[in-house]
Structure formats: C-alpha cells, structure tokens
Amino acid sequence: MGTLSLIWTLMKREFRRLASRRIYGFMMILAPAFGFLFFTDLLKPGLPMKLPIAVVDEDYTSLSRQLTRSLDAIAQTEVVLRTADFQAARKAMQRGEIYGIFHIPADFRQEVSLGKQPELTFYTNETYLLPSSLVYKSMRLQAALANGAVQQTILLAKGEGGPQLTAKLSPITVDTNPLNNPWISYAIYLASILMPAFVFMFAMFTAAYSISQEMKEKTATEWLQSSEHSIIVALLGKLLPQTLIFMVTGLFYLSILYAYWHFPLNSGFFPMFFAMCLLVLAAQGFGIFATGLMRKTRIAFSACALWGVLSFAVSGFTFPVPAMPPLIRLFSNLFPLRHYYLLYVDQALNGIPVIYSWKPYLALLLFGLLPLLVLPRLKRNLQENRYLS
C-alpha cells in the first residue's frame, strides 16, 4: 500500500476515534468556542466602564457638587457613594464595593475664592491593578480640569483673557497619537493573544492525550502495524485530522477578531492565518515531544500545562520582554506563543513586509519539527505498548 493510502487509512481511523469520545469534542471544539465567546462578550466595550467610586464631599457647595457631577460624567467612572464621612467611604473600599475615593476638603470653595491652593485628594485600591489604574487616571484628569477651571476664574477676575490666558493655563500643548490602537482598547491586545492561546493549549493537550490513549487502551501496536511500522506515517495519520479541526477553530477566532470586531489587520488576512497554522503545528510538535521524552503520561501532561501557562507570562503581551531580566528574555524564545505574539505585532498591527518576520515564522516551524528528536524513543514506547500513568 502506498504512503498516501496508509495516511488516509490512518486518518479515517483517527476520525472515528475522535468521534467516539466526548473528551475530544470538548477539547477541540466546545472549550475553545466557549473561550472565544466568553472573551468576545467580556471585552466587547474595549475598556472597563462605569467603575464604582465614592466622593467624600466635606465642602458641599455648588462648586464641589459640580466637580462630583463632572467626575460622574466620565465614561469610566460612576459615583455610587456621596458622603461627607470619609470612614464610610474607606469601609466601602475595604469591602470591595468601590475602587477609589475622591476627597473634596472642607472650605474648598472659600479657599478657591481667596486664591489659596486647596488640595483635592484621591485614593485607589491597588489590589485591583487595572480598575484602580483607570480610576486613578479619571480622578487625576478631573483634578487637573478643576485646577484649570480655578486658575481661569482667578485670571479672569484679574482682567486677563484672550491668548495671554490660554498661554498661562496651557503653556505646552501635548499632541498624543497612539499607534495601531488609537482607541486604547484592551480587547485589541488581550483578545488577540488569549484566543490563539486557547487554540495552542488545547492542540498541545489533544496531541499528547491521543498518543497516550493508544498505549493506555493497548492499541499502540495495532496503530503502528497499520502504518507498516513507520512512526512518521503513524503520526501524520493521527495528527492531520486534529490539525484540520484546529485550523477550522483558528479560522473561527480569526473571523471573530478581524471580521466581527474589525481589529487592525494591516498586512492582510493570509500572514495571520499562516501564523495560526504554524502555531497549531508548534503546539502539536511540543505535545508529541513531551510525550516521547517522558514515559509517564502525567509528567508529559504536566510539562505541557506548565509550558502553556508560562507562555502567558513571557510572551510579552502583559509585560514587555525587553524589560525582563536577560535570562528571562533568552528563555522567552522557548515558547511558541512568544513568536506568535511577535508576528501579531509585526503583521496585524505594524503591517511590515512579511519577509522581515521570517524569524518568528521559522521559530514556529522548528517547534513543529521537535518530534524528530524523540521519534526513536517514542516508537519504542509504542512498541512496548506499556502505559505508565
């Protein structure tokens, strides 16, 4: 029988095995789809909105009430507690009901009228990093606007106006131009990595699990015989059905990102689709490598899980790799998700020519070839047909 016929026979065998167990349907379709839909709904606004804060107003004049209304009008904050008792606001923050406190001191309006410098104080709960950062930004903006309004009132009372007033209030004009993500949307950089990370992890687990099940069910010898004892043909017949399914799953998440959400895609669809296909191959390659290297199945699964979890930390989308210690920067190259992230930045965001991204493409391809290092050992394990949990 020819090689292609053998592969096709093994592929049909693998499709039957995939359809016979619900765990495969969960890992390959249901779990990734749930993750996609979950993050689609969670990150839909782009930024967290209406974060609850408290205003401690000890002045309670028309000026302080105007400040409170202005702070409540900012899209990212919502004043849910207005009180003159700071202790009540502090207890609400300790209970986790609010993320920040905006404190307006007593005699605020009087000091403004006399040309003094009253202090606006705000507190944030840094236990929650992202909400507290956004709340801090909003309250700082409101404090700056309040300061500008006060200075404008004082200068107008002194008879100053026109260009002279503008120059004193804003001597330096800052022109901010955020590149590639002008909306400052967390969805653009979070969803674009979290969704492929789901595909990567489940493809890795499925490859490792499907091979270990052959040994557990004592069908590894029959599997090898069906390939005429060629481990390469056996692996191709087993992995190609999984690869096709995960590519369809990856195409689904790419459609969500770039067709439904209209995220930046400056180099076109094909470079990112090609990167996704290589990511699936890299995940399967690492899964087979771990299975062949470690005889005990639970150790192989633990290695895959560890590599998948660490990928989130060292890929660079949460903390920049150049700012990491030198050893960690070097270590980050051992994770396929890191190279996919570089391709996402180069192709989807920056839109540079594909030729300049050859290194991350090559790195993902090399991860897909990792099983070549353990093929003899993996074949011996399959021939012995001994399952070690």
Image (tube, rainbow, N blue to C red):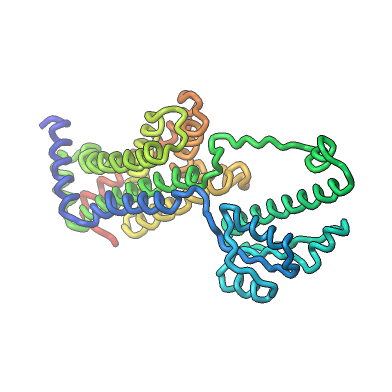
Q: Which residue is found at the position 68% from the left and 76% from the top?
A: 87
Drawn side of residue 353 relative to residue 236, left or right: right
- Give how far across and how far down residue 330 sits, in percent: 56, 42
- Give how far across and how far down residue 15 sits, in percent: 17, 45
Drawn side of residue 157 relative to residue 358, left or right: right
Q: Nearer the viewer, residue 211 or 338?
A: 338
Q: Which residue is found at the position 57% from the left and 54% from the top?
A: 76
Q: Is residue 362 above or below residue 216?
A: above
Q: Nearer the viewer, residue 214 or 164?
A: 164
Residue 11 found in image quarter: top left
Is there any visible trace of residue 111 in the rendered image?
Answer: yes
Number of marks present in the image shown: 0
Q: Is residue 366 above or below residue 377?
A: above
Q: Nearer the viewer, residue 178 or 388?
A: 178
- Give how far across and how far down residue 178 sits, in percent: 60, 37
Q: Quadrant of the C terminus?
A: bottom left
Is there any visible trace of residue 282 in the rendered image?
Answer: no
Q: Which residue is found at the position 57% from the left and 66% from the top?
A: 80
Q: Which residue is found at the position 68% from the left and 35% from the top?
A: 175
Q: Is residue 343 above or below residue 387?
A: above
Q: Quadrant of the N terminus?
A: top left
